[in-house]
Image: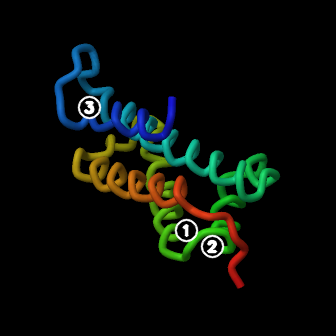
């Protein structure tokens, strides 16, 4: 699935009642949004700096400001560091709210659009 398709499925979970997802849809939605972000970064690195895709997400996010604009890099960090814990279930954690998921969805949609149209270049 493409990042856009993953985001479309996440949007479907946010806007409609999907049978069989009661209580599970927030984490499923967080996973879909996170996968869209990660896949978008993989595609960006494939055309910009192929070796970076094999690095940890932390390393990729540290590299991103050198190859994409500062705002996109900051948004990607915010989204990933919010989505990473939200996608994992722990008995002591509450699932993310619909408002949090919508914010991450919109943020990742903007990142996907920016990275897919970015022209690879080393800044400064």
Viewer can see residue 90: no
Q: Is residue 39 above or below residue 1?
A: below
Which residue position is annotated with label 2?
Answer: 65
89 horizontally vs 10: left or right: right
Mark 3–mark 1 Cα distance, whole angstroms, equals: 27 Å
Q: Is residue 10 visible?
A: yes
The residue at 69%/70% (across/down) is: 121
- Decide which of tag 3 and tag 1 comes sooner along the chain: 3
In this view of the protein, which residue sits in the foreground, 80 or 94?
Answer: 80
Residue at the extreme top: 20
Identity of the residue drawn at 69% across and 53% down:
45
Where is residue 10 shown, x and y percent of the image?
34, 36
Query: What kind of element bears circle 2?
Result: helix
**Helix, strand or loop at mark 1:** helix
- Label 3 secondary element: helix
Q: Position of residue 41 (x, y in %)?
A: 60, 51
Image mark for residue 124: none
Q: Earlier in the sequence, mark 3 or mark 2?
A: 3
The reply to whether dot 2 and dot 1 touch (C-beta < 8 Å) is yes
Location of residue 62 (image quadrant): bottom right
Q: Residues within 10 Å of mark 3 (few under 14, many from 20)?
A: few
Which of these two is toward me, 75 or 68?
A: 68
Provide the residue designation for mark 3.
12
- Placement of 11 over or under 55, stated as above or below: above
Residue bearing the label numbered 1: 73
Tell me how far mark 3 sits from mark 2, CA to CA: 31 Å
Above or below 2: residue 53: below
Residue at 40% from the left image edge and 58% from the top image edge: 110
Choose the circle earlier in sequence order: 2 or 1: 2
């Amino acid at each position: 699935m493409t990042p856009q398709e993953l985001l479309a499925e996440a949007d479907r979970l946010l806007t409609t009642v999907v049978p069989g997802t009661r209580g599970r849809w927030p984490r499923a939605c967080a996973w879909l949004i996170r996968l869209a972000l990660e896949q978008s970064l993989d595609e960006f690195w494939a055309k910009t700096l192929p070796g970076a895709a094999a690095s940890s997400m932390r390393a990729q996010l540290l590299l991103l400001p050198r190859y994409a604009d500062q705002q996109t890099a900051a948004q990607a960090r915010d989204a990933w560091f919010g989505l990473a814990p939200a996608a994992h279930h722990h008995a002591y954690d509450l699932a993310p709210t619909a408002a949090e998921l919508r914010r991450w969805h919109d943020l990742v949609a903007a990142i996907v659009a920016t990275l897919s149209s970015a022209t690879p270049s080393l800044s400064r």
